[in-house]
Image: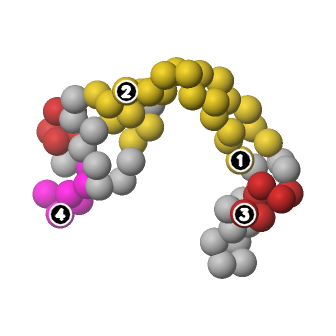
């Protein structure tokens, strides 16, 4: 399950994932001078959006409430 900031939908993904330490891949994900130490590589077999009712009710993206 992936929760995307500011989105009400949740994405459900079926497939496989591996944790990698490939330096060139990690360098491509750098933000400024910060380079991640690990990456998650996901091979998606199927992806689908789920109803956002739980996200709406949780007010997750509305911290002022």
Count residues near mark 2 (Cα–Cα under 10 Å), then give few for <14, some for 14-19, many for 20+: few
In the displayed structure image, the side of residue 28 where residue 42 appears, left or right: left
Q: Nearer the viewer, residue 55 or 7?
A: 7
Residue 48 locus on image (x, y percent): 37, 27
> Any mark on residue 48, and which?
2
Q: Nearer the viewer, mark 1 or mark 3?
A: 3
Q: CA distance from mark 1 to mark 4?
A: 32 Å
- Secondary-structure class at tag 4: loop
Please report the bounds of the magenta region as a residue range. 60-65
| Residue found 64% across the figure and 30% down from its top | 43
Cα–Cα gap, marks 3 and 2:
27 Å
Q: CA distance from mark 4 to mark 3?
A: 35 Å
Instruction: Point out which mark residue 39 bears.
Output: 1
Q: Assess disc 3: are there few (<14), some (14-19) or many (≥20) residues with their C-alpha within 10 Å of its C-alpha.
A: few
Q: Which residue is mark 4?
A: 64
Q: Indicate which disc, 3 or 2, sits on the residue closer to the N terminus.
A: 3
Measured in 3D between alpha carbons, the distance from the residue under mark 2 to the one under mark 4, in whole angstroms, is 30 Å
Residue 44: percent from left, percent from top: 57, 28
Q: Vertically, is 31 above or below 6?
A: below
Mark with earlier residue (1, 4): 1
Quarter assignment of residue 53: top left
Q: Give the number of the disc on residue 52.
A: none
Q: Are marks 1 and 4 in contact (CB under 8 Å)?
A: no
Q: Residue at coordinates 24% horizontally, 44% vertically from top-left?
A: 8
Q: Residue at x 44, y 27 (%)?
A: 47
Instruction: Name the quadrant containing residue 18.
Output: top right
């Amino acid at each position: 399950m992936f929760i995307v900031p500011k989105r009400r939908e949740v994405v459900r993904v079926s497939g496989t994932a591996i944790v990698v330490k490939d330096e060139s891949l990690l360098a491509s994900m750098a933000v400024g001078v910060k380079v991640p130490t690990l990456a998650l590589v996901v091979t998606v077999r199927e992806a689908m959006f789920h109803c956002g009712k739980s996200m709406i009710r949780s007010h997750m993206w509305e911290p002022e409430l």
